[in-house]
Image: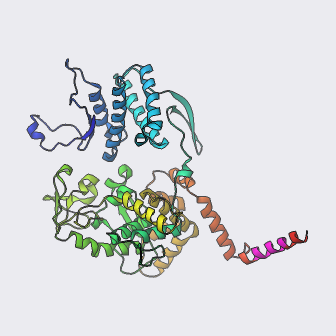
Amino acid sequence: MDVAFFSAEGWESWGLSAKPLIPEGMAMLVGDDLRFESGDGRRLPLSLVNEWLRLLPVSGCPAPSSWGTYARILRDWAVAADEHGVGIFDTRDRLKALLSHYAVERSCGDPKRHLRAKTWNQHMSVLGLFYRWAVAEGHAAAVPFTYRQGVALYAESVRQILVNEATRRTPKAHVTIKYLAEDFATMFVNGLAGLRPDGTEDEGQGRFRGRHLARNGAVGELVLSSGPRLQEFTYLLACEVPALPPAPTLMPIAFPLPENITKGSKFRVTFASYSALARTHAYLGLERMLACEGSAWLPPKRWGEPLLVTEMDARGGRVNGDRVLWETLRPAQRRRLVAPDGGSMLLAVRSDGGPFTAWASVFERTSKRIAERFDPRFPHVHPHRLRHTFAMAVMERLVAGFYEQAARLAAAGSGADAALAHYLTTSEPLLVLRDLLGHSSVLTTEKYLRRLDMLRVFREHYEDTGRRWGFLEDEAAEREADGEFADEMVML
């Protein structure tokens, strides 16, 4: 049994009267015998699984990037059922016995098939959704899970929930969500650019001779400066990068993120620092230009036909002859765009001008190199950790009033974005961060910050302000007082 992805290319030759009502790129399960019906015309369970998968876009999973994950989870479950002679819609006792064996296999069996607690819980959640649908549609008479009543508390709201007892305990959220301290963030960007932690050239024995260092360093600093998610910066087009102001500024620069690449398809405006944008434009103007100019790259056939761009500007262009706005394009379409002068339209490209999307691998290799060569404390950096780092850095600056001071200085000079300056000087910090991160509610932002170390931000700001205004004793006075008590202890 395997997972396949639907493509309607060439459907006219299939003998159909109309194009199939199956979303492009939809995942489906295909058995070894390629059958979906029994000899007497009854639908096989695999056909019902595929029906549920086709309904994912209207069942809370509109993102094509997740369809394959759901299909693979159901495939593993179906394969396990087939190995032990259990039907997907068997009796409750047999399904529960299968679930018990499956849990042991995925935790104590072949190490290559082990699932961590968080991943196991994701599998159970997907299977739970599938079986609830199957029961509601009359396809199944029983489910393999046992549920208990639970209570969810948040702020002042209380609600009853069903808890799947097949799930495993996981670490508390504040333990699993990490961010980079300022020195580690700088070290990481320098590492992406092939530099030593202090920003100097990596020379001598064992020095790093990586490729695309300008690209990696530029994108890394841009993400730390603006906080987009992995999909949001991976599928950003080069022409969507904000223009660089004519002069350096402390004010952040507005950075719109088109809705069709954001989580939940919600348009939002974050911002980026001048230095990050300057570095990105330097990459655009040299390394990227050299890679793309005259490139013969075309998207592989499995992606679909090439989308050839002509007459382009910052908002859109002609794609295969039709005028298209960039904001309407989804990731699968964006990676097929071919620029007028050759090469991909994405911000990050390979040496042949094709789109580069393997950021998780680049970040992992960089983290490992820094830990092995310079600082063994350096953590593994997943792309989302940069988003957490951005959130913490912004909150520190909001609490300290940095952006307010920068806005007032820029407004007194010549050139601040009036709307952004007004917004930063009049809005509550939590509201600002909510909008930058794209959360639907300030309660989400508050819960998110609780998982980070916000108490440290407020404590350090309180202590720093107290020392500057003389409300708290400075370090010299603290040391002197400690000395007095040390002398007292000696006398005793």
Q: Is residue 416 magenta?
A: no
Would you say residue 330 is visible in this rendering?
no
Quarter that holds the N terminus: top left
Residue 162 vertical placement versus 342 (above, below): above
Residue 396 x %, y %: 55, 66
The part of the chain drawn in magenta is 477-486
Residue 156 vertical placement versus 350 (above, below): above
Q: Is residue 485 magenta?
A: yes
Q: For residue 195, what is the image quadrant? A: bottom left
Look at the magenta stretch and give its main secondary structure. Answer: helix
Residue 64 x %, y %: 30, 46
View extreme (front): residue = 205
| Residue in front for this viewpoint, 13 or 432 | 13
Residue 429 x %, y %: 54, 62
Classify residue 406 as left or right of residue 206: right
The colour mode here is rainbow
Residue 191 vertical placement versus 444 (above, below): below
Residue 115 vertical placement versus 307 (above, below): above
Q: For residue 237, what is the image quadrant? A: bottom left
